[in-house]
Image (cartoon, rainbow, N blue to C red):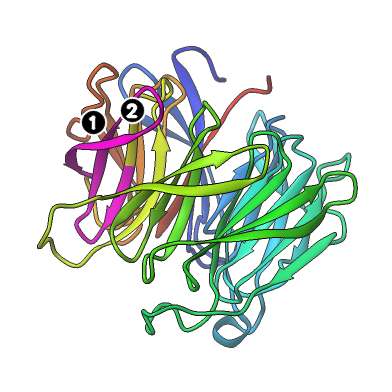
Amino acid sequence: MSSALSSQVLFSGNASLDQAGIQAYSFDEVTGKLKLIAAFSGFEKPSYILPHPNAKWLYAVSETAQQSDGVPGSVLAIAIEKDPMRLKVINRHLSGGDWPCHLRLDRSAKWLFVSNYQSGSAAVFPILEDGSLGERSDHLQWQGGGPNRSRQAGAHAHSSILSPDNRFLIVADLGSDLLLIHEFDPTNGKLKFHQRIAARPGAGPRHMLFHPNGQKFYVTNELDNSVTVYAYDSLNGNLSPMDTLQTLPPDMPENIVADLHLSSDAHWLYVSNRGHNSLALFRVDEDGGLSRKAIYKCGGNWPRNFSISPGGRFILVANQNSGDICSLPLAPDSGEIGEPVDSINIPHPTCVQFLLPPV
């Protein structure tokens, strides 16, 4: 049971069907310790999961591909049963492409967006009254590429995000160095192309978030170890690049950037470095600008995803290659990250999601 001093958190990874690909833990907001609640197998490569705000439903991708796995990617709707906790698949649909790697709910939590990395496509699904996924309402396919031929031979949709007013969907295309902005119609789940914003050639935009003021927008660039700050024009649905900062000093070992999150007070931005195996800390000024303050070790190898605890005192990091979740303490006043206070083993962890009680 969640309380002010404890919460529940779900972890998932690139696990096989016979492995515990999704696991649930209780999290102590005072000590940063984790305790296993339940482990669930029967999910094929559930690399990204997303709880519904009502805490009754969970959505997951199956990050497979026709060529490598014999089946294209899919997305699952899952019921969360409690006392004891169980996960029961409600239904599933093909995701409309290969290697689906990210999910996003719109602001109403009635529409689910899936990004298919390998295929360079995105799809929209309605969420029905019982939590199941309805038939796909829209599907977008992109073509393109970038200068990094080993990683950018084609379009690669890596994530999506809704504007604060729910009017626009922004998709990060790592393969083509583009942010693709589409008008979103929440009545029928349709997307209409609005405009494309070019990132730096070879940057590889990956994950995105808005500052709470709605006027600044942050994007991690996987391939050139950077984070870019954009000004967001809410009236016209436009992004203008303002500043790009490196997540590491020069001459560091080979590295690629992954996830990003703001502290609850939006004074600090954290970005994960895979290869250097660290978290970069950026100070956020009053209008949303950034300055890099420090870099801290993440406690493991290959921090693909992480999440800040609801109490704001810890970061839980999914270290994919070392197969562990590390709990690291935060100093709210300075943003500093301490040494791990707990570590648990998870098969190839790729996603961390706190299961918050319904509002």
Q: Is residue 42 visible?
A: no
Foreground residue among 31 and 175: 175
Tell me the CA gap for discs 1 and 2: 10 Å
Q: Is residue 288 in the magenta section?
A: yes
Considering the numbered disc 1 on the image, is that residue within a helix, a strand or a loop?
Answer: loop
Q: Quadrant of residue 329?
A: top left
Q: Is residue 176 in the magenta section?
A: no
Q: Looking at the rendering, in which quadrant would you find the C terminus? A: top right
Tell me the chief SS of the magenta region: strand
Amino acid, disc 2: Phe
Q: Residue at x 55, y 75 (%)?
A: 155
Circle 1 residues within 10 Å: few <14, some 14–19, many ≥20: some
Residue 98 % position (x, y):
62, 75
Residue 69 % position (x, y):
58, 81
Q: Determine whether, in the image, residue 70 is placed left or right of residue 336.
A: right
Foreground residue among 22 and 117: 117
Circles 1 and 2: CB atoms closer than 8 Å:
yes
Magenta region: 271-298
Q: Please give the residue where the numbered disc 1 appears in the rendered image.
A: 341
Q: Looking at the rendering, in which quadrant would you find the N terminus? A: top right
Q: Which mark is residue 29?
A: none
Q: Residue at x 70, y 34 (%)?
A: 165
As drawn, 169 above or below 200: above
Q: Determine whether, in the image, residue 159 is placed left or right of residue 281.
A: right
Considering the numbered disc 2 on the image, is that residue within a helix, a strand or a loop?
Answer: strand
Between disc 1 and disc 2, whose residue precedes? 2
Q: Please give the residue where the numbered disc 2 appears in the rendered image.
A: 314
Residue 172 % position (x, y):
53, 59
Amino acid, disc 1: Val
Residue lying furthest top in this view? 4
